[in-house]
Amino acid sequence: MIPSPSLFFVITAIALLADALIGDPDRIYRLVPHPVVLMGRLIGFLDRVWNRSDQSPLRRIYFGALTAFIVVGVSGAIGMVLHVLLQQWAYGWIMEGLLMSVLIAQRSLYLHVAAVATAFSNDGLAGARQAVGKIVGRDTSALDEEGVAAGAIESLAENFSDGVVAPVFWGVVFGLPGVLAYKALNTADSMIGHRTEKHLHFGSVSARADDVANFIPARLSGLIIWAAILFKSKAWHAMMVDACKHRSVNAGYPEAAMAGALGIRLSGPRLYEGQEVDEPWVGGDFNEPTCADIDRALAVFLRACLILLGIIAVLAFVFMR
């Protein structure tokens, strides 16, 4: 058995390696739903049952908070049961790392963003719009090359934080229970944490709790991206100046770091459901992004993932001594 102080570091390092090498096997998920899919079904059920238009805003906030508590609590409890059971086996920590790997999105994120660059090459702008539409929530039908490239790179940077660094962070802190609880909260935020009439009150607790859960990982993500380009001043300056301009209290840090790393501007005005949303620019003094910048962003992402793995491996080694 691995000494307990280093256990979560080792399990998380295994998870990072397994995700990078294997990813999410489609054959398995044709037979067994992905954990996030199951979380989404529970959230959707509670949303349909409790989020009713005839209720007062206060009651919708209450039931939305209860939804977040149930989904996060159930997920964390399942993680704890699995952790306790697996630790009864001599090599259960390896299995725990493999289970945790399905909750980390390095490989899938890389493939989805790389698909946008491939679509540009093979199918032109129309194909790239379709590809980027799978990973962003904005209206992609009228995007030009710069808009498609920006959407892909923004998704890569933001999801490096909440799809890679945040699960790793909570895995190091609480192990598999922490990752499952975080993914449940993040899924709730993505499903009901919107400022729409339907979810403004019901999803408010999920949205605020997700902001808290991602506060440290988002800033760590920006620092890791900065390290991935050898601490160049552009990325640091962009984080310090532009991150706070972003509509999200967290996403601005990895996006600003990536904008500075590539010398491009991100965020800015975009269309949601046919309405233009006037968002401020991140890296506003830099160049417009192009298709070629997607490949450059992917290279930065790969180096950032290697740095993250290196940090976890070193910490595991230090705590095992």
Image (cartoon, rainbow, N blue to C red):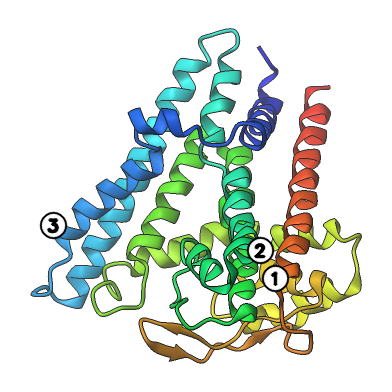
Which residue position is annotated with label 2? 121
As drawn, the label of residue 179 is none
CB-based contact (under 8 Å), mark 2 and mark 1: yes
Badge 3 crowding class, 10 Å Cα cut-off, few under 14, some 14 to 19, many 20 or more, is few
As drawn, the label of residue 291 is 1
| Element type at mark 2 | helix
Residue 301 in picture, x, y percent from top left: 73, 55
- Name the residue at 58% across, 64% down: 155
- The answer to which image quadrant residue 125 occupies is bottom right
Q: CA distance from mark 2 to mark 3?
A: 46 Å
- Name the residue at 81% across, 27% down: 317
In the rendered view, would you say 91 is above or below 307? Answer: above
- Name the residue at 74% across, 62% down: 297
The amino acid at mark 3 is Val
Answer left or right for 187 relative to 50. Answer: right
Point out the residue furthest to the top here: 90
Mark 2 or mark 3: which comes first in sequence?
3
Residue 93 in picture, x, y percent from top left: 59, 19
The residue nearer to you, when weighing 125 against 253, is 125
In the rendered view, would you say 174 is above or below 286? Answer: above
The amino acid at mark 2 is Ser
Q: CA distance from mark 2 to mark 1?
A: 9 Å
| Element type at mark 3 | helix
The residue nearer to you, when weighing 108 against 60, is 108
Badge 2 crowding class, 10 Å Cα cut-off, few under 14, some 14 to 19, many 20 or more, is few
Which residue position is annotated with label 3? 49
Badge 1 crowding class, 10 Å Cα cut-off, few under 14, some 14 to 19, many 20 or more, is many
In the rendered view, would you say 144 is above or below 1? Answer: below
